[in-house]
Image (cartoon, rainbow, N blue to C red):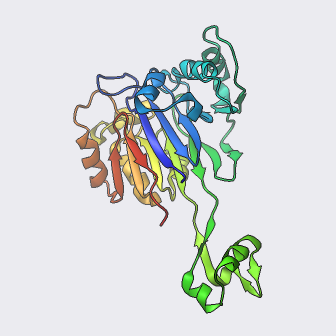
């Protein structure tokens, strides 16, 4: 049975706290693991969360500030130490190639794993297509070049029992119709409807911009930074970040089903205030104010 869940490894912005590690987020998706923004301490958080190096297939870095990338050195070395048996692909802003190179080769170690470098350029776009998803990126607005990532499952078909019965299709013929598209004059359109693929987006350090809205549109699960509370909106704008209310309004406008707020400034001591402000901004869907080691399921298909 396929697993689709987010494993939260860290939720702090800039400075870790006693209760919040630097960033780190693993998306499990049908046997693949995509690690987003491994900050300092990610390798230890993986151990605490029960995540192994063998679980990693892609590394996705939004930008090269330390709280989003300093953990790359340890994670890459662990992948090699554990001799991960499959190739691993790294995505990151092309403008930060020198930072990636320094982190990849920060110290001496033996390379045993094929690590493919596929940096993101320009405005982003499609990075990978697999049978299970398409991964693409969008440019964000931050003092350094930053990208958000979006994963979209291909649309499928939902068979409708009443229409199958009406057209006399049953048993093994249902599978034949699904594979071939038609059977004895009956087409898939006659007995099924489109089942929209699931959608996930990961949005870190950014001001409000078109990229944020495009990434969030129609998501089943949106992980998005809310570094500041609304009363500090000027600080958020000055430093290239979002407030809880801004993030929630983007989610509400985009029809997001489950919103995960994260990347909290150490200046705030009451996490519940982020939830209050998100609700006040009009978001009515499922809401998680992320904590380290949380596990969040991708909502089941509608």
Vertical placement of residue 69 versus 165, above or below:
above
Q: Residue furthest front?
A: 171
Between residues 170 and 296, which one lies in front from this camera angle? 170
Instruction: Indicate the position of residue 154 as horizontal and vertical percent values.
Output: 64, 59
**How many numbered markers are drawn?**
0
Instruction: Decide if residue 119 is on the left or right side of residue 197.
Output: right
Task: Please indicate whether residue 261 sits to the left or right of residue 231 in the image.
Answer: right
Q: Is residue 205 visible?
A: no
Q: Residue at the location (66% across, 18% down)?
A: 101
| Residue extending furthest toward the top | 108
Report whether 26 appears left or right of 180. left
Residue plotted at (55% across, 40% down): 140
Splitting the image into 4 quarters, where does residue 223 fall? Answer: top left
Q: Can you give x and y, in whole percent of width and height, for residue 268 in the image?
A: 26, 31
Looking at the image, residue 1 lies above or below residue 46: below
Instruction: Give residue 34's quadrant in the image.
Output: top right
Comparing 70 with 162, the one in front is 162
Quarter of the rendering containing residue 60: top right
Which quadrant is home to the N terminus? bottom right
Residue 282's spot in the image, x, y percent?
A: 32, 58
Can see residue 8?
A: yes
Residue 97's place in the image compared with 127, above or below, is above
Q: Residue at x 56, y 47 (%)?
A: 29
Residue 294 is situated, as x and y percent measured from the top left of the image, at: 37, 39
> Which residue is depicted at the point 34% across and 51% down?
287
The answer to whether 61 appears left or right of 131 in the picture is left
Viewer-nearest residue: 170 or 141: 170
């Amino acid at each position: 049975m396929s697993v689709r869940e987010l494993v939260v490894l860290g939720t702090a912005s800039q400075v870790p706290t006693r209760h919040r590690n630097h960033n780190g987020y693993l998306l499990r998706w049908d046997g693949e693991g995509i690690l987003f923004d491994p900050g300092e301490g990610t390798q230890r958080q993986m151990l605490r969360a029960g995540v192994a190096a063998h679980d990693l297939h892609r590394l996705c870095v939004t930008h090269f500030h330390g709280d989003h990338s300093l953990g790359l050195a340890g994670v890459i070395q662990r992948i090699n130490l554990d001799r991960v048996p499959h190739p691993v692909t790294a995505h990151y802003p092309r403008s930060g190639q020198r930072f990636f190179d320094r982190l990849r080769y920060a110290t001496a170690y033996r390379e045993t794993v094929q690590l493919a470098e596929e940096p993101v350029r320009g405005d982003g776009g499609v990075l990978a297509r697999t049978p299970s998803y398409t991964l693409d990126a969008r440019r964000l607005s931050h003092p350094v070049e930053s990208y958000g990532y979006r994963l979209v499952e291909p649309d499928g078909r939902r068979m409708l029992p009443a229409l199958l019965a009406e057209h006399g299709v049953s048993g093994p013929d249902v599978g034949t119709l699904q594979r071939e598209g038609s059977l004895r004059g009956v087409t898939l359109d006659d007995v099924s409807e489109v089942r929209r693929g699931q959608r996930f987006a990961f949005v870190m350090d950014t001001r409000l911009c078109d990229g944020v809205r495009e990434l969030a549109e129609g998501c089943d699960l949106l992980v998005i930074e809310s570094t500041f509370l609304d009363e500090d909106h000027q600080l958020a704008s000055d430093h290239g970040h979002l407030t809880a209310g801004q993030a929630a309004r983007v989610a509400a406008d985009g029809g997001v089903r489950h919103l995960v707020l994260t990347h909290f400034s150490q200046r705030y001591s009451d996490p519940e205030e982020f939830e209050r402000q998100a609700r006040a901004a009009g978001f009515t869907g499922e809401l998680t104010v992320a904590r380290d080691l949380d596990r969040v399921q991708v909502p089941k298909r509608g």
